[in-house]
Every structure is written in structure tokens, then in C-alpha cells.
Amino acid sequence: MKKAIFVFTVLLTFSFQAQTKKWTLEECVDHALQNNITVKQSELDLEQSEINKKDAIGNFLPTLNASVTHSWSIGLGQDPVTFDAVNSTTKNLSGGISSSLNIYDGLRNINQLHRSNLEILASRYQLDKIKDDISLLVANSFLQILFNKEQLKVLQAQQVVSQQELERTNELVDAGVLPRGDLLEIQATIATQEQQIVNAENTVLLSRIQLAQLLLIQEYETFDIVDIDYQVPTTMILEQSPDAIVSKAKETRYDIKIAETNQEIANDNLKIAKGALQPTLRGSYNFGSNYFTSQLFDTPDFETQLTDNKSHNFSLSLSIPIFNGFAASNNVKRNKVNLERAKVQLEQANLDMETAVYQAYNDTKGALKAYEAAQKTLEAREEAFNYSRERYNVGLLNAFDYNQSQNRFEAAQSDVIRTKYDYIFKLKVLEFYFGIPITDIN
């Protein structure tokens, strides 16, 4: 009985811990990278590229095949001694080993091996790019939850203030200092705040569910993140010039590397296509023997025949392409077009990178200015609200004007939170281009 109680207690403890676990940003990113379907598909693409490399290596190796044939002949046949037509039953067993090797094929095997190495590199770059994109998406969803939670805290704090004002207003109304209409106005304000809190709680829940779905976590109701009050990080990134960030991005980001590798792959494809216009030299070797029996005469034993009937065959085969319906020449032209297309795509990737970095740089500067302006507005709105509350408490301000001041103060608080997290995310995107990990927020 005691053992059962102990086991139940342990299971209950683990269940409680599992339900109350709160995820850090780093844990969210790691979990997404391990479980995301797109990542898994890209990993399979990389595995496929590595198999293709083995095929390319195999093209350098000689082929080796063995064959065995056993045949029976019953009825009219030819006597192998007199060459007369006779009725008999004969058996023939033959076998051999053959091997062949490409000696020269227009360097296609070499270029195919080089291309397979590039394809592996391109697959790795693509996998890393997908991981980066997912990391950014997770970070954005993570920060969105924090933003929604802070918005909820602001509304809850304002409701506490409104409850205090309700008690104060009730006393002033009872004392005849304020009209009863002011009490009704405060009550209406509190009702509106309660509705806003419910909406904010739903928003927090929805944002948590969205991140859980992104992480492929099924426990939507219990999923939550750590409640960290991220402060605006100090950074030197805005002291860098956009050109310096672009230069760094081209070294670290995978968009450019993928385009560069694809251009090299297109160049190898062109070399392989040109190799088909050159002669192909192939060497081969065959070894064989056979065993024969007949009802017409006695034949040597199995071992003797295999020894006496051995044969060796060596050959060289030269194939010279002369005309093949323009297939080879058109393939060369086709791959020339693909190479030019790859060059254009690389040029476009560089332009896109420059545009993205400049956009991120300007967005970050604009977000910082908006955050600083929101802070100044909040300070002014807070002073105005405190002044309005003092006047309201002594009956020099009506409830409507007091509520307007309070609403402006709440809006200023929300605006600070919004601009804060908007700046943090845009700053992280800009730093990401500079090679700083997305999980390094503080």
C-alpha cells in the first residue's frame, strides 16, 4: 500500500511539473529545429545528396558480373564430332566473369563527382537557411506572447486603479462633493476594462497556441513560456554602416552561399554536357568456361572440361559521337542557358540581400525612435493623469474628462510596450544579418 502511494505521488509530481513547465526562447528554438517537418524534409534532401555522391564515386570503379547458364537439348541436333543430324539428349553448362571500365568519357565522371560534392554543400546551406528562418519565426512568436502578457498586466493594473477610484468616488458622492453620474461613469469604465481584460487573456491564449502549433506541441492549454521582462538590449549594431552589415551578411547568410553553389553546379552540368560530345573509350575483360555431356559419346569429366574449355577475352571499345539528332548539342545549349540563369539568380540574391539589410537597418532605427518617442509620451501622459486625478478627487474635474485622461495614459502605456517589442524583434533581425544568434536577446 505504501509503495502504491509512493508511486502515485511520484507520478503526480511529474505530471504537475510537466503541466507547469515554462519554455525559454532557446528551448523553443531547439525543439522547433528538432521536430519541424520542413527541417526533416531538408535533412532527407541532404541524405539523398550524399547517396548521389556514392553513385558518382561508383562510376570510377569497374563493373564485375558473373553469369551461369545450364541448357538441355532433346531431339534432333548435330553431332559435335561428325556434324551429322542425330536424335540425342545433350546438356551444356557454361559460366563466366566479365568486367568493364570506363577509361575516358570526356571527364564526365570527374565532373559528376565534383557536382555531387557541390550538391551536398547546397543541401547543407539550404538546411541551415531553413533553420534560420524557423528560428526567426519562433522568436517572433515568443516575443508576441511576451508583448500580449505585458498588455494584459497593464490592463489589470489599470483596473486596480479604477477600483480604488470607484471606492474614492463613492465616498465623494456620498459626501455630496461629486454627482452620482460620476460614479456611474467610473462603473462603466470598470466594465469596459473587464471586457478588455477578457479579450487580452484570449489574445495571450491564442498566441501561446500559435507557438505551440509551430513547435508541434499538442498540449495547448498547458503550454506556456517563461515570464521574462526583456529590457531593451544594448547594442552597437546601429553604429555599423549598412554597407558593413551587408558585407557581413554575405559572409554569414546562406542565401548568397546557396546561389553561389547553384552557379557552380550549373557550370559542372555544362561541363558534363560538353563531355557527351567527346569520344568514349571503354575496356572490358571476360573469362569463361563450359561443360558438355551427350548420350552419343563419352565426354571428359567436369573438372577436365572446365580446365580445357577456359577462355579469356580482352577488348577496347571506342565510341565516337557523330550525329544523335542534335540531342548532345542541344543539351549543351540548354545548360549554357541554365548557367546564365544561375548567374542572374546570384546577382539577384546579392541585390535582395542588400535591400533586406538596408530595410532592416532603417526599420530598426525607426523602431528605436518610435520607442523613445513613446517613452516621452508616456511620461507626459502619466503626469497629466496624476494631475487629472488630483483635480477629480477635489471635485474640480468631471468623471468624463478624468476617464479621457486615464484612457490616454493607458494608450501611452500600451504604445510603449508595443514599440518596445517591435524594436527588440527588428533589432534581432538586423543583428541576425550580422551573425549574432537570434536567441541572444539579453
Image (tube, helix red, strand yellow):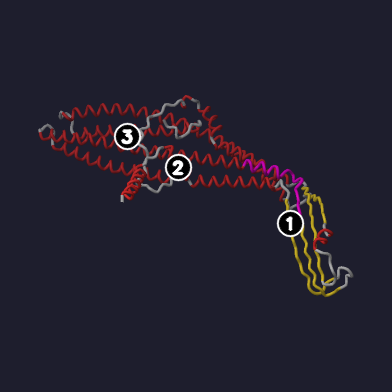
Comes first in the chain, label 2 or label 3: 2
Task: Pick out the residue farthest to the right.
Answer: 82
Which amino acid type is marked by label 1?
Ala
Indicate the position of residue 78 as horizontal and vertical percent values. Answer: 85, 71
Please, what secondary structure does the residue beneath circle 1 have? Answer: strand
* Part of the protein shown in magenta: 97-118
Crowdedness near tag 2: few (<14), some (14–19) or many (≥20) residues, C-alpha within 10 Å: some
Q: Nearer the viewer, mark 2 or mark 3?
A: 2
> Which residue position is annotated with label 2?
31
Q: Is residue 176 magenta?
A: no
Residue at left offset 88%, top offset 70%: 83
Q: Nearer the viewer, mark 2 or mark 1?
A: 1
For the residues labelled 2 and 3, the Cα–Cα distance comes to 31 Å
> Which residue position is annotated with label 1?
66
Which amino acid type is marked by label 2?
His
Please, what secondary structure does the residue beneath circle 3 have? Answer: helix
Horizontal side, residue 19 vs residue 249: left or right: left
Q: Nearer the viewer, mark 1 or mark 3?
A: 1
* Labelled disc at residue 414: 3
